[in-house]
Image (spheres, grey):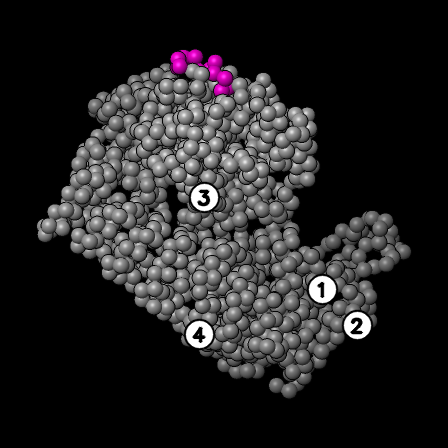
Amino acid sequence: MRLLNVNSLEFAEFHGDNQPKYVIASHRWSDREATYKDVRNGQNKNKAGYKKVLAFARYIRERLSPLEWLWIDTCCINKESEAELSYSINSMFNWYRGSEMCLAYLEDIKDKERYLSSVWFTRGWTLQELIAPRLVVFVTNEWQVIGNKGCVFSHCDSMSSGANLVREIATLTGIPERVLNDWGTSVNLAIGDKIRWIEGRETLREEDMSYALFGIVGIRPGVNYGEGKDNARQRLLQAIKQRDDIRSPPPKLHNPVIEPQGSFLSKGSKNNAATFADGDPGDSSTAILEGRPYPTSSATLYQCLAKKDSCYCRCHSKVLKSPHRSRYIFTEMQGLQAIGQACNVETCTARIYGIKFRVAIFPSLLPFSITAGLQITDSWIPTLMLRPDRVCDYNGPGFRCLEKIESGRPPLKNIPENCYGQALDRYISRKVTSFKQLFTSGQASFEDVNPKGEGYLDLLLMRPWPPGMQNTQWKLLEFLMLGSPAIVLRNPRLLHRCAKWIGEGPHMDMLLSLLYFGLDPGCLDASLFQDWPQLCSPAWFAEQFAPDPMFIEFMQKCLQRQPGFGGCDYLSEALLTENDAEFERAIDCALRGEALRTLPNALGQTAVHLAVLSPSRLTMLLEAGVDPDCIDGGGSTPLMYAACYGASASAIVLLEHGADPSVKDRRNGRYFIDYAVRRRHLKFIEDVSVWLRAETGAAEAQNLLDRCLAFWFINTDDPSDTCVEKRLLGLGANANVLLWDQLTLMQLAKSENQTQLLKASGFTAINSRDKKGRTPLMNVASLFDFDTLSWMTGPEHKADVAACAHDGHTVMHYLFSSPRLHNWAVKDGEQAWHFTQRANMVSSLSVLLDRGASAFTTDNCDCACSDAGCTALTFALHKLKYLREWRSYQTSTGPMIELLALLARRISQQDLAMCCRAIQRFRDFEMHGYTHTCCRGQTEPRLGSPRLLSDQATYSTAKLEQIDFDTTLGTPVDESKALNYTDVIIKFAQLCFMYEQQPLDPWLPPTYLTVRSDESDEDDDDKSPFETTTNVDQGQDVKCRKTRDPTPQPRIYESHDHKNWLQWCSQNPNKLRVQGGSQAFVEHGLKLIASFEGEMQRLRAGD
């Protein structure tokens, strides 16, 4: 993109996202326009078009001093290059969208009142120049402001943008007001409606009638001048049709979280806005938070990686259960979410954690902020801060619309005076909307007082609210300041009362809104201000201690009306109020030998902290002798502030003047570079590392990059996204760095993407051990990363699969205790991710077994169900017990059972006795661990004791038959309920080989075994409709009604007679009902059962 500097009249080209803020020109072409060569070479200055360019530049210099770049289509495009011309036409719509403002020069208008008669509104190319920019300011041929379309931004303070002309322009052009205010709201309009907007307009070239629609309809087929009007239109329509034909809905693994409302998608939906969160194909649904005019001024959208249909909710709702931890993906808007027909400030689009957020906001044009981020467990991590610029006085169109919103509830009527306060209190406790309607309809008054002379509103604001009601109190205050600004302005006392109450918390949006209403900062209690945390806005993010632009703006407004506000000294005040003369005077005094005093404000911030956004002023302060390592109230240095902002130039200035990079803050115990990593300021890290390498040597730069990489591995919120790791490794970070406790990055990895990135980056510390004796292979096994596991255990690297940590845990212990086996969420059926992970689990276990790993190596930990420590098999049984009896309803035991089945198929004869002993000990402890009272009032053994891992009792002897349960566990043994060895073997066999999609609980006695019956009994009709079977659990006869179905029914056999059951299974293996398994699999299971029985008989006889 080529831009013209309005000061030097020289061109500069910018690529990608490097464009500065610029103004874009809109005008009607004439015959003598200035070309690119004219302006570049300074020739043909007598052309009318050249004078027009100079007039645009002069207007920007004089009226928009913060902006210094201009784009105008006549001279910023080299029309002699066909490629550049085609590229510019394809990109023009986006250039208009990205401009700070569009300056529309109506050459044929001198009288402001007749601006709608301008030819500008009849030209084809001016259509996109009207609707694409966020702000269009119309001027006459004498450069007098007529009015504006869109939103007025902060850099336009120095100029008058005139009246808002949206309604008149919408009437003239037929374009909806919401589209004129923000193009992003046109997402639900039909393509045909957009094409009809150009009807009645004209262009110099007939093909331009179609080319001018490229950006509006969202296609880029390219230009081909000379093809004619009809061919151009036909090519346009074909491109649209082709795009729509190949565009298919993204594949979804589940239903959308919120079904779109038909009213929102309808053509006439003018009073709605929405927040979109679009996931990648196959990744998530599209969530829509319908933007109807809510009574609150904040709303939250929780997006959606779960399959459960649900409406949006105002409380936290878990949406994803990842293999590692629970997560929430959210967006929060401080400020009004949606106001019917109000002006739209901004449509913000950003991508976070693989989800693209497009937030269409209809606020009241007062200060607000948007936050999108990720919540992990109870920690809130800010990852995306979108804050559109805003400037508006209280009589803007957004406020007028606010006054029109009504609740629909009946007003408060016929209430006796002595009950009025109670009724008002009850109304506000129920819903702020009712309170709002009462006051806007005149049924209640802000000045109402009770017999004691206390205002009801004062009581509502100042009283201690019960738990759960504080949010309603905040909504009430938001209504007072945002919902009815005219009422607030008519009641100055109310304005100050609100400010006094809000001063108790760091609610920057509200306080800044009050300043717009004319609040006197002197009414704020200085002691309350001192208690505000450094995070300022938003207050709940412990990482966000550096003052954000909203806090800076708040301080500027306060200092303008009350010098010294918040404890600011003269130097900080000069910085915040941009009083360059006062600032330079103080610096000159310091250079002449006078002491330069920098006193901290109420938050402990000095002028150095506030100057990090201005490297030149920061340099002046440091050269005047200010300490570069001064700390604020939380122990943060200016270097940490620079890291939070990503201000690499200021950080280098601080380092050059002796700032200590090894200082830790008191808040989190972190170095300055940690905050840069946390906020993904990779350019900051690169610049600082380059400076360190040049000034202090390669070792310091290497240590910096290694710390950044390790810090990100530990604190990353999305381990599957390795963009930051790749960039840091590309800058020179070492993949083999040893961290504290001799840990490697492979041991800190949380996903397969991270482990495979380390593998590709030359990780060689395969058999390194940390201070606890753990190897990288153990962490890789817990992640079930089959590729990395095969690579590490292969013949090239030969990772030690038999290595034991200091606590005796082997790689098999880590595999069977993997968190992924705990969080196997299959609430609504397994999806593609589950099948892939299950295959990786089985393959990982197979690789380890092939390499010689054993699941029967005992650790060094005392365990109540083992005489010599726990094996990996015991770990698996513990996990299975937990999943089957104490798991949530979303978790499945399928993967663990599949791993146990694979282990059973690979078991050797030498491990058979150990396996049997582990199973028997586990079962005996489960039966005698402790008792509970069942529903029938009888005392029975409690299965699945949660005390299983915490009880540290040990057995007195290794003989299985002589365990003294009375002494060891303090629980008497009921020998009639103790299970014999055969029962344990059958249970394990059932677990491994008779598993169905919905298996019986392997740790509950299998009362029945189902077998196939090929034909029904011939004398079935002669038998009683009831037959007696024995229920093993209850020890009593129960009646089971036989089903009179002509289809042959399976016969129910009693399974407590295990010896007869084994004999029957050996003689009738083809009658076993097994789903998902082959007959060979069943036969192998029967052989294993027989082997178990023989081994147990040998143990019984020998021991």
The stretch in magenta equals: 110-121
Residue, x 65% and y 62% (percent of image)?
839
User: Crowding near pointer 1: few (<14 within 10 Å), some, many (20+)?
Assistant: many
Q: Mark 4 points at which residue?
A: 770
**What kind of residue is marked 4?**
Asp
Mark closer to the observer (2, 4): 4
Dividing the picture into quarters, in which one does residue 1055 lie?
Answer: bottom right
Q: Quadrant of the C terminus?
A: bottom right
What amino acid is found at the position of numbered circle 1 in the picture?
A: Met
Total numbered circles: 4
Q: Where is residue 526 in the image (x, y as percent from the top left)?
A: 19, 40
- Residue 326: mark: none
Q: Does the stretch in magenta take in 986?
A: no
Q: Earlier in the sequence, mark 4 or mark 3?
A: 3
* Residue under pointer 1: 994
- Separation of marks 1 and 3 at Cα, in angstroms: 68 Å
Closer to viewer: mark 4 or mark 3: 3
Left or right placement of residue 776 versus residue 452 in this view: right
What secondary structure do most residues of the magenta stretch adopt? helix
Say which label, 2 or 3, has the lower sequence index: 3
Q: How far apart are marks 1 and 4 (CA)?
A: 42 Å
Q: Which residue was labeled with disc 2?
A: 1066
Pick the front one: 420 or 822: 822
Tell me which residue sits at (34%, 64%) in the image: 694
Relative height, residue 471 to residue 420 (above, below):
below
Q: Are marks 1 and 4 in contact (CB under 8 Å)?
A: no
State the image coordinates of residue 594 (x, y, percent, origin top left): 9, 50
